[in-house]
Amino acid sequence: MHAIVCIKQVPDTTEVKINPETNTLVREGIASIINPFDTYAIEEALRLKEKFGGKVTVLSMGPLQAREALKEAIAMGADEGVLLSDRAFAGSDTWATAYTLSQAIRRLAPFDVILCGKQAIDGDTGQVGPGIARQLQIPQLTYICRLQEFDPVARRIRVERLLEEGREIVSCSLPALLTVVKDINQPRYPTFMGIRRATRLEIPVWGAQALPDANPAYLGLSGSPTQVVRIFNPPARAGKVLLITGDTPADMASQLAERLLGDKVI
Amino acid sequence: MSKLEISGDLCTACGTCVDACPFGALSLEGDVVTVNDQCTFCGACVDVCPAEALHIQRPEVAGKSDLAASHGVWVWVEQFQGQACSISWEMMGQARRLADQLQVPLTACVLGHNIGHIAREAIAYGADRVFLAEDPSLANYRTDPYAAILVGLVRQHRPEIFLLGASARGRDLAGAVATDLHTGLTADCTGLDIDPETRLLRQTRPAFGGNIMATIICPKYRPQMATVRHRVFEVPPADSTRRGEIIPVSTVIPESAIASQVADFVLEAGQVNLADARIIVTGGRGVGGPEGFAPLRELADTLGGALGASRAAVDAGWIPYAHQVGQTGRTVKPDLYIACGVSGAIQHLAGMQTSRIIVAINKDPEAPIFNVATYGIVGDLFQIVPALTAEFRRRLGR
């Protein structure tokens, strides 16, 4: 069984500021982590390996610093890691990112399953997973909260997807691409042995040269259909809190109810 | 100029593509498929071919003429179990405004089974034309057949703008369709405008958990695709006297070409879903345990609202993840958000700070939730919340 997990390194906070002069993100002094949703994808892949044998490969695209994210996944138990890093990949939007990752996955094939987090907490798009699946022409199953059955021999999978109205139970053929939500598992911590292994392991870095079948016109900024033309701070929430005080809970409840009925939200 | 290539080596003459072609452009000649000049390069055959023997060669990047040839605004109307989802009509109001500004027609794509009534609703909400694809294989949303039909329609009719809802299904579908079409897709938009000079769609969206906003354009590829966040835009008034054209779509993707089967759906019984809820009552660490949600549930039921939870409460195992609001849960925008015992970590605020009215009930007057609250009560939620429930029951007669 070969599971490939796509992970992204993201800033460890949502408190990102904009430099008002350059209109770019201020990233200095902010630690980087594995995108939280991707840690559930790693854990699910490790559980599959424990059950069926085989290996787990983690794949990321980003600056050289993203090696740290791959090493952390290896410390958790992943077998191999590959980093896609090249100036030619810079400025990729979700289309170009999915294209580049899918080109790398073709080199890592064969595989039974690709796992991704449902979205990254910096971009919040959730588009790269489906993009990879379509590039590779394999089925996609998104927003998975439970893996009910996984049969690498019969090449079938059965999952629960968390949708707005409830949970959908879907079966599908393998190989497939899965994106997972937080509910699916509790990611493990890196082990001492894992950390030692990760420290020694060389993470190969693949540039555009390593993807000979990739169309250079589809990479990076020039391969990205979308362009960001403006970044700005959202308008601050207007007004200040109105504190409601009173002698008894019933008194405060009555005042609040009066306000809310007046605001016509009930 | 586009060209449909048929690999004689790979073609097994199974005839699937001949049946799938909406234009009768394909035929079996001996043991190989041939194409005539009826072909519109819609791609329906490529998508169904089990042998991957078909390929459409297209010009690399859309030239100026291709950009100019793209015309019209499209919306995918999402439905669940035969009912249109509210995001579809919220989007339709915006799409109508964009179409009017560009002076182009507005088209709705309605896919499902026995959903003719939704096509008529789409016209009432502003569509000039509806593509209606009805088939048992489309009863439940599945990526393969839905994407194949939309990709085919877009390639054939070439809209300049295509909007879908930023729901789980909408994001799943939009990601697939935009990849196949090789065009730009902007996720979760909260603002859509036309640049009057370039006629480009300016798509504004929050990123980094709502801490920054970005405006994005897609100048060289068509259609310009975006998913639209729920409850940002008002549902326009429906006008049942509006006239529009309903065009049946006969393309059917054979079951053998669809990878997935929906076995069951477990509805979250008795709960309003967080995405659509107008009122949400949320509990945080301050509720103390699973039983602490009982008074909150009573208040939510009294107000006809949904029950939310902070990450702390979900991680403690007090309530299922489906209730989680915030960066790693759901983003919500109700009219009224009542936060009980929620401290207001930045990751929680990211998921709810655009709610219209926020009420904070917390023992700690320094809790950050008060910074975004409209009204605050410093006190014990186990006293305040039941008092509030009693007060509303009395006033609303419930």
Image (cartoon, rainbow, N blue to C red):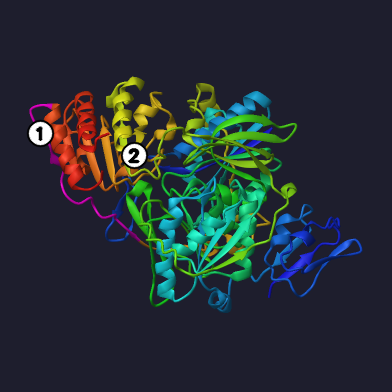
**Residue B91 location (% of width, % of height):** 43, 59
Up/down of B82 relative to B291, above or below: below
Residue A199 lies left or right of residue B229; in this view the side is: right
Span colored in magenta: A231-248
- SS label for mark 2: helix
Q: Residue most toward the right?
A: B30
> For the residue carrying disc 1, how many other residues have a C-alpha within 10 Å: few (<14), some (14-19), or many (20+)?
some
Magenta residue check for A244: yes
Q: Is residue A210 visible?
A: no
| Image position of B18 (left or right of A217) | right
For the point 23% across and 26% down, which residue is it? Answer: B386
What number is the disc on residue A245?
1
User: Is disc 1 placed on a helix, strand or loop?
Assistant: loop
Which chain is disc 1 placed on? A
Q: Quick check: do tags 1 and 2 share a chain?
A: no
**Is A115 in front, or is A266?**
A266
Label 2 marks a residue whose chain is B
Which is more toward the observer, A167 or B228?
A: A167
Q: Quadrant of residue A6 in the image?
A: top right
Q: CA distance from mark 1 to mark 2?
A: 28 Å
Q: Which residue is mark 2?
A: B347
Please report contact status of discs 1 and 2: CB closer than 8 Å, yes or no.
no
Report the predominant secondary structure element of the magenta stretch: loop
Residue A167 appears in the figure = yes
- What residue type is disc 2 on? Gln
Quadrant of image for the N terminus of chain B: bottom right
Tell me the quadrant of the picture where the C terminus of chain B can be found: top left
| Mark 1: amino acid | Thr
